[in-house]
Image: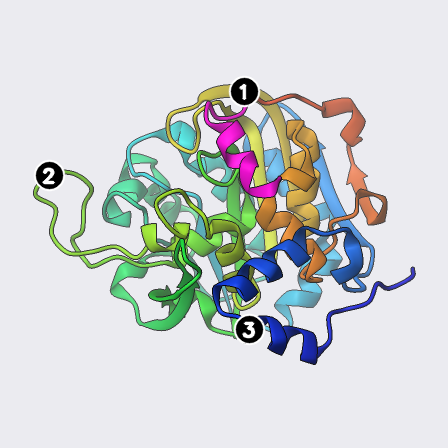
């Protein structure tokens, strides 16, 4: 496979010296044809279709068990990051049966406790764990549930609408290099990033809020999640996902499409009965495969395109080996968010 050229150190320094203009130029560089692509190996992704969400998840993981074992051998503990943007809408969240399939797969491979860790946007994770019946899994599996907002953090920087740096709290618990990080995501459309899959699930869950913070009138404290959107019109969200994604990304992506969400996601969309799951140790290859299954144009999804051109994973379908079911047999066309044309303007 022929590798494309990277920008030189001199080029990047020259762009940075130009302030805002340099930042915008860097974004344009990532939008340009693949001149900035890195050389990335072909990747394997599992796709399973079936009538049981838990069984689908388990079987998809079995198809790539060798790769998972290889990754586990380098880590000390497993952390599953579910998608729980809010604590009171089951369609928007990772289903307990998906976690069941994951825990059943890991049971013979992991001797110690497995952690499930989250920081929802609208309130404490404990409410979601109870509402979505995650906590019932403790009767069968060695699993501990963690409030990320109560754990240590590090300060990273994202950009605002003027591409000026803004500090944000990022979960140290998820960034620990000894963690094997599993993103248990969902097929969902999004109001700011077109789709939200395995990478975005991890990044925005890792942006923390004050303990006790809640959405709505009378809320106390603050949250760093909106800062990650990069301004009032989400001008920097794609660049922020790229920047943070270089430091924090899943070791294993499990994206559940048993019942996906279309329309006004990530919270107010409608269900799509798709009955599939995608899993891969190359998170970008997994997200890329799901984009195809959902019927979206990959090149219009800024953060995933930027990550592919930065060499963070495999974004070329021709270099992704799909094992299990065939992608062509399970293509759907998910209805995008009502504001999709405004979202696409940032990639024009």
C-alpha gap between disc 3 and disc 2: 41 Å
Q: Position of residue 1 (x, y in %)?
A: 92, 60
In x, y percent, where is residue 274? 61, 23
Q: Is residue 346 magenta?
A: yes
In the picture as drawn, the residue positioned furthest to the right comes out as 1
Disc 1 target residue: 272
Residue 331 in view of the camera: yes
Q: Give the label, 3 or 2, closer to the camera.
A: 3
Q: Secondary structure at mark 1?
A: strand
Q: Earlier in the sequence, mark 3 or mark 2?
A: 3
Say which quarter of the image contains residue 14: bottom right
* Residue 37 in view here: no
Q: From which residue to which does the magenta span run?
A: 335-348
Residue 67 in the image, given as x and y percentages of width and height? 73, 59
- Say the numbered circle drawn on residue 16: 3
Query: Which mark, by number, is residue 293?
Result: none
Which mark sits nearer the N-terminus, 1 or 2? 2
* SS for dot 2: loop
Indicate the quadrant where residue 332 lies. top right
Viewer-nearest residue: 40 or 150: 40
3D distance between C-alphas at marks 1 and 2:
33 Å
Which quarter of the figure has residue 127?
A: top left
Mark nearest the camera among 1 and 2 is 2
Q: Nearer the viewer, mark 3 or mark 1?
A: 3
Does 140 lie within the magenta span?
A: no
Q: Which residue is mark 2?
A: 217
């Amino acid at each position: 496979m022929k590798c494309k050229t990277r920008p030189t150190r001199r080029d990047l320094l020259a762009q940075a010296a130009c302030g805002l203009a340099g930042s915008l130029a860097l974004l344009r560089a990532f939008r340009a044809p693949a001149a900035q692509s890195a050389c990335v190996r072909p990747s394997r992704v599992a796709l399973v279709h079936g009538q049981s969400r838990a069984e689908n998840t388990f079987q998809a993981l079995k198809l790539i068990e060798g790769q998972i074992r290889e990754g586990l051998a380098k880590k000390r503990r497993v952390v599953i990051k579910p998608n729980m943007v809010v604590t009171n809408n089951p369609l928007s969240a990772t289903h307990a049966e998906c976690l069941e399939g994951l825990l059943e797969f890991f049971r013979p491979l992991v001797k110690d406790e497995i952690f499930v860790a989250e920081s929802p946007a609208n309130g404490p994770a404990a409410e979601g764990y109870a509402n979505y019946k995650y906590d019932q899994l403790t009767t069968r599996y060695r699993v501990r549930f963690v409030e990320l907002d109560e754990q240590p953090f590090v300060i990273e920087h994202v950009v605002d609408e003027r591409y000026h740096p803004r500090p944000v709290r990022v979960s140290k618990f998820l960034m620990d290099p000894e963690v094997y990080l599993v993103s248990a995501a969902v097929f969902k459309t999004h109001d700011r990033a077109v789709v939200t899959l395995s990478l975005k699930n991890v990044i925005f869950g890792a942006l923390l809020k004050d303990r006790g913070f809640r959405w709505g009138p009378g809320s106390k404290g603050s949250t760093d999640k909106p800062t990650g959107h990069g301004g009032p019109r989400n001008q920097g969200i794609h660049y922020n996902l790229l920047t943070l994604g270089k430091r924090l990304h899943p070791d294993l992506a499990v994206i559940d499409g048993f019942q996906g969400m279309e329309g006004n996601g990530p919270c107010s969309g409608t269900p799509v009965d798709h009955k599939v799951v995608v899993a891969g140790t190359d998170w970008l290859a997994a997200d890329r495969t799901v984009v195809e299954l959902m019927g979206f144009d990959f090149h219009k999804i800024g953060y995933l395109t930027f990550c592919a051109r930065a060499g963070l994973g495999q974004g070329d379908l021709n270099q992704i080996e799909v094992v299990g079911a065939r992608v062509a047999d399970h293509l759907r066309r998910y209805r995008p968010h009502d504001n999709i044309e405004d979202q696409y303007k940032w990639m024009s």
